[in-house]
Image: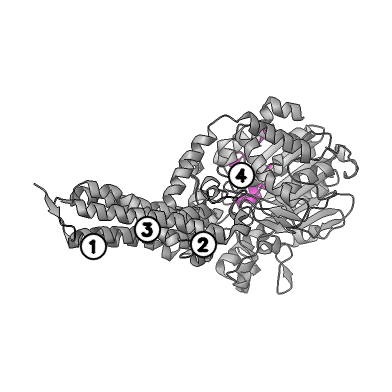
Amino acid sequence: MTHPITPGGRYALAFFGTLATTLVAIFLFTLVKCDITYVAPGLLRRGIALRCLADALWVLLPCIFVRTDVARRYAIAAMLLCALWGFAQEVYFKAYSDLMPFSSLLLWENVSPLLIDSFIGLLRPSDMLFAALPLAAIAALHFAGSRPATFSRATKRAYIATLAATTVGGFAANAIDYHLTAQVAEADGFMQHTVANRYKVSFRRFNYVCLNGYLPYVAYQIFDSAREALPPSPEEMDGITKFLHSSQPTYTDNSLAADSASQKNLIFIIVESLNAWAVDMEIDGRKVCPTLSHYAHADSVIAMLHVCTQVAHGHSSDGRLIYNTGLLPMQNAIAATDRGHNHYPSLAHALSYRAIDIVGDSKASWNQEATSTAYGFDSIFDQSAMLHLLPDNAVADARIFAKATELITPSRRADGPFMALITSLTMHQPYNTPGVPTTWISQKGKYPTEVLNYLERTHYFDTELGKFLAHLERTGLLRNSVVVIASDHNDIPASTLRGDSHTTAADKEIVCLILGYNRRVSIERTVGQIDIYPTVLDVMGANAYHWKGLGNSVLREPQVESAVTFTGSVVGNAASPLATRQRKAWQISNSIIKHNYFATASSKAHQ
């Protein structure tokens, strides 16, 4: 037999009050832990708190239709799942500056010791609140006691009325915020011309949740996943072709190539987490990266120390995509895992050299084996191919450069020019331990432990790079090669060194050096990662290739002096004549990758 709970019953009020308060706390804590600087000023003005309450009431809605003992079990499960989800998002946000896409939940092949170490290194004591909040609510419900009972009609009506009021209030707050910020509404996406577009366009998941709420975000993700599976419309494919015809460079001259570029090898080194500020950093007058600093100021180099990072949810895999293909990352998915088998234009295809790909982790991680083939490489060598080279305790970058040395030494390779892509690993987060033999850097103790550990790893990479370049010089390969050294993405911003919580775009700059050019070119303007691909084509004398990428060569006019990040922000000169095209390029690139454009008839017509 069940007993009704009266409309004003204290248990009903305590039951829903405890659960709703706990869920709101979990939702808000997740957002605040991700980015308090964005959430704090918008908590009331944007209606973030109100939407979190509406989301909590929607999650608890099934409780009013079942007995209290069943409702308790459902509510406890919901709280624990929401807390687990919030914890995962907060840790993911620390690494990728956004919420986790649903597709990443299925990437079990990426779980590795490196990923686990990174996860552990990102944990903080305050993360315990994700467990404490639901456990406190469970304890409160336990001590309150219960009996099999049903909620009265009046209680149900009151609950639904509250749910409706908070839901409508959340929508109203969003509409008011839109009209108050209409002039700068494009900051969260490419098109914000109506308030409805806030619900239809997502260029950053975190912003979407703050503006619209968690449940609209879930609905959007489900809708977007279904939309991603649809074939492209003729209009969309035609839009890609028109954009490329109207804005992609059409030059074919090689007047800016390095000396004898057609005979030069290309050695492209993608450096894990290399911040631009580290290149010339000194501690007590001593260089942390003497090799990088030397070549950054050498005579025969194109030096870019103000490169805007443009990776998205794929992080390092996005860096590989940008440099190899001249395409930008996908906005709501990870190209390497979701579209790894696409047909891609690339540097390797443009050069038509024998091409080898050397990675320090497993080739299964981030689908590297598939993308390596798609990017035009003949073979890929991962950690399993390096075990015989050095002792078991050798650091990753030592193994990587040793394998590269083995493969490209003149006596061990076939005749003719080659392309080698080398991806470092030692500087990968977390930085809770040095991870390498410590040096004089750790003895200085001027900076936080995390920064000192990062500097130790950067110094280690720099030393191994110096040994590798010295080998190239001894064997004559350096004279006959173009060597590109480029960061895959930023990690520790320069603001961390200053102890400043306010981080600017300049604090996140990365670096690209192109060695082996016929003169020194120092680019002091802001450029994007996407601009490296066409610049390398210029240097290698490969402009007969049909695909110049979605960037612009830094050696040509109009001058590149701006870049657009995956959040839609313009870095550098916002008035640059290239800025409009740079923003549109994100949408075009997303459609190109999503629909495998370069395998279609439209692409062949464009070529």
Which tag is nearer the camera, tag 2 or tag 4? 2
Q: Is residue 267 left or right of residue 125?
A: right
231 to 276, vertically: above or below: above
Residue beneath label 3, please?
Answer: 53
Residue beneath label 1, please?
Answer: 140
Mark sitting on residue 317? 4
- Front-lying residue, 37 or 171: 171
Q: Earlier in the sequence, mark 1 or mark 3?
A: 3
Magenta residues span 378-403
Crowd band around label 1 with a 10 angstrom C-alpha radius: few (<14), some (14–19), many (20+): some
Q: Earlier in the sequence, mark 4 or mark 3?
A: 3
Residue type highlighted by circle 2: Asp
Q: Earlier in the sequence, mark 1 or mark 4?
A: 1
Report whether residue 160 is seen: yes
Residue beneath label 2, please?
Answer: 35
Q: Position of residue 156 (x, y in %)?
A: 24, 52
Q: Is residue 434 left or right of residue 10?
A: right
Residue type highlighted by circle 1: Ala
Q: Residue at x 65, y 64 (%)?
A: 504
- Front-lying residue, 265 or 540: 540
Marks 1/4: CA distance? Answer: 46 Å
